[in-house]
Amino acid sequence: MKERTAKLQETVGELEAFSYSISHDLRGPLRVMQSFAEALREDCGEAVGVAGQDYIRRIVNAAVRMDRIIQDLLGYSRIARTELVLERVELGDFVRGLLDGYPAFHDHKADILIEGRLPAVMSNPAALTQCLANLIGNGLKFVARGERPVIRISARVENARAFVSVADSGIGIPERAHELIFKTFYRHEPGYEGTGIGLSIVRKAVERLGGRITVDSMPGRGTTFTFDLPLAEKS
């Protein structure tokens, strides 16, 4: 049994390394394609006509989307493969720094609120960044047209663990899709931008941190994701 488990772990590790290598190598040719398409649009836009310009636009947009998918795959592989060393993280300071450091969070007309005191936890900063950035990003993205997003970040303490919640005012998720949304490439709302990998990264990161993530949501009533982390000892 131990030999089978070890062999399985070795195989999984090899597949993850292969996936990382392939995803990384794909970005080079993709960037070349995107660069030449953009150069063609700038230098020969008038010559190719309206239809040609539309084809170029589609090529560029497809390349940008493909690059985003590859980046997300690399992020997933990195979380799955990298050894996660836990350290003390002052969650309140960490979240405020994350919000300040992500320009995309400031491009939206949104309210991102930290409610109450966030405790110190044992976590890995890189994995925790992936969790919070994806959950906040989804909260900003999946809102009804014309609505101002409101995101509330809070935590409760129970049995020496911190239960961190990211609640949004978005379009919500039907109960039948609560498990599906964590599957790689699943996109419940195809009308919105995204690769369908973000929540897979979040779940993988939370699991590697020794916790689990839950979702509480209904259509039209927003979504709350909650994941748990071990509390840090008092300093």
Image (spheres, helix red, strand yellow):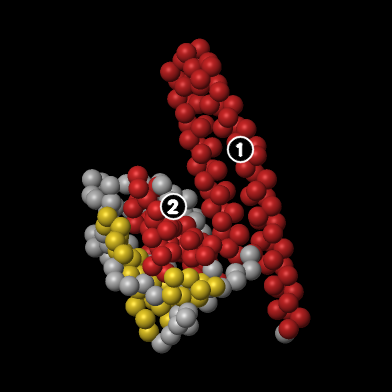
Residue at (24%, 59%) from the top-left corner?
Answer: 220
Relative to 151, 103 lies left or right: right
Q: Quadrant of the N terminus?
A: bottom right
Relative to 46, 2 lies left or right: right
Residue 101 numbered mark, or none: 2
The residue type indicated by label 1 comes to: Leu
Residue at (52%, 65%) from the top-left corner?
Answer: 125
Percent of width and height locating residue 99: 39, 56
Residue at (34%, 53%) from the top-left corner?
Answer: 140
Q: Considering only order in the chain, which callout, 1 or 2, is on the residue closer to the N terminus?
A: 1
Residue 218, quarter of the rendered image: bottom left
Percent of width and height locating residue 136: 38, 58
Percent of width and height locating residue 225: 37, 68
The residue type indicated by label 2 comes to: Gly
The residue positioned farthest toward the right in the image shown: 3
Relative to 21, 225 lies left or right: left
